[in-house]
Amino acid sequence: MSSQAFQAVTSKLIANSVSQGINAFAYFDWPQTLEEDQYWFSPDALSVAHTDKRDELTEAELIRLAKWECVNSFSLNTLGERELIENMTNVMEQLKLGDAQEYLYHFINEENQHMWYFQKFCRAYAGKIYPSIAIPVEEKTLSKPLHHFLVFARIVLFEEIGHYFNIQNHKDERVHPFVRSINEAHYNDEARHITFGRRVLRELAADALTNDEDVAIATHELSKTLLVNYNALYNPSMYRDAGLESPMKIRSYLIDHPARQSLYKNVILKSANAAFVKIGITLNFPGDEND
């Protein structure tokens, strides 16, 4: 995409953020409590979906699990968006995006609001946020263009995963109405963020992916990100809090399940994967070694 076309897309996104964005701090009518006999997460989006493990659980067990999968999802968003804001803030003034630079301020403002309402939900209705698992990061000396590209590429992957669950949860009428409203609000903002992310990757790739070594490094780093994000969807704490026996055994079974691996690659991240292929990166997904 030409720089002129990129600027035009970003100008439209800025206008939409102004006209369609919400003030999350005043938007939601927070109930005192949430009924726990309703799904807080679509049963079709649970980590046990598409496996025989779902059939082994009673309706009551699925509803309890849905509560804690919701908490896990919102916890991941809280911590992930905090990291996203930090990383973007660190590089945004180094980028050369012309007038499109302005959109980054809208992006950060919206992510800050998301972080606020996700953490508020977890604390108000579950009494906690699930902590993230520290992942050792291999220190590499990267060119600035490649570093900037990886910052936005990781953001794209993170947001595409969240987008899938927003869609599943805000459209499913079995899910508690308040939870649906949060997913819908997040979906509306993230649709703009994803459009920007895919476009900006094309702009950044020209300077970042200049040779085979750059492509190999980017592929390696992003494939690690895919694995970390995938594993985070199967937090043993949510199985434990739902009262299920052998939470680590459940986690291992689901992580290795071919249907779950296929869903991640061919449904959840199908569009993102296609976008990376267009710029010359073939990502390695969990389970690819078994193909």
Image (cartoon, helix red, strand yellow):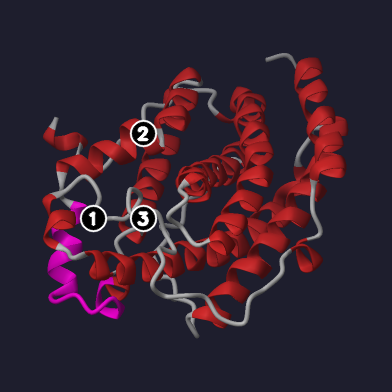
Tell me where residue 80 sits by quadrant: bottom right
Which amino acid does the dot numbered 3 rest on? Val
Which residue is at the front of the view, 288 or 256?
Answer: 256
Q: Which residue is denoted by mark 1 in the rendering?
A: 48
Q: Secondary structure at mark 2?
A: helix
Residue with the mark numbered 3: 228
Nearer to me, 104 or 59: 59
Q: Characterize the local packing of mark 2: few (<14), some (14-19) or many (20 or more) Cα atoms within 10 angstroms.
A: some
Q: Is residue 210 left or right of residue 190?
A: left
Q: Residues within 10 Å of mark 1 (few under 14, many from 20)?
A: many
Name the residue at 43% across, 71% down. 132
Q: Earlier in the sequence, mark 1 or mark 3?
A: 1
Write the start and end of the magenta stretch as one range: 239-255
The answer to whether 129 is drawn above or below residue 16 in the figure is below
Q: Which residue is mark 2?
A: 267
Which x, y percent locates residue 4?
Answer: 81, 16
Q: Amino acid at mark 1?
A: Val
Q: Amino acid at mark 2?
A: Val
Q: Is residue 181 left or right of residue 251?
A: right
Measuring from the top left, give residue 214's x and y in whole percent: 47, 31
Kindly identify the residue that appears in the image at 78 percent across and 56 percent down. 109
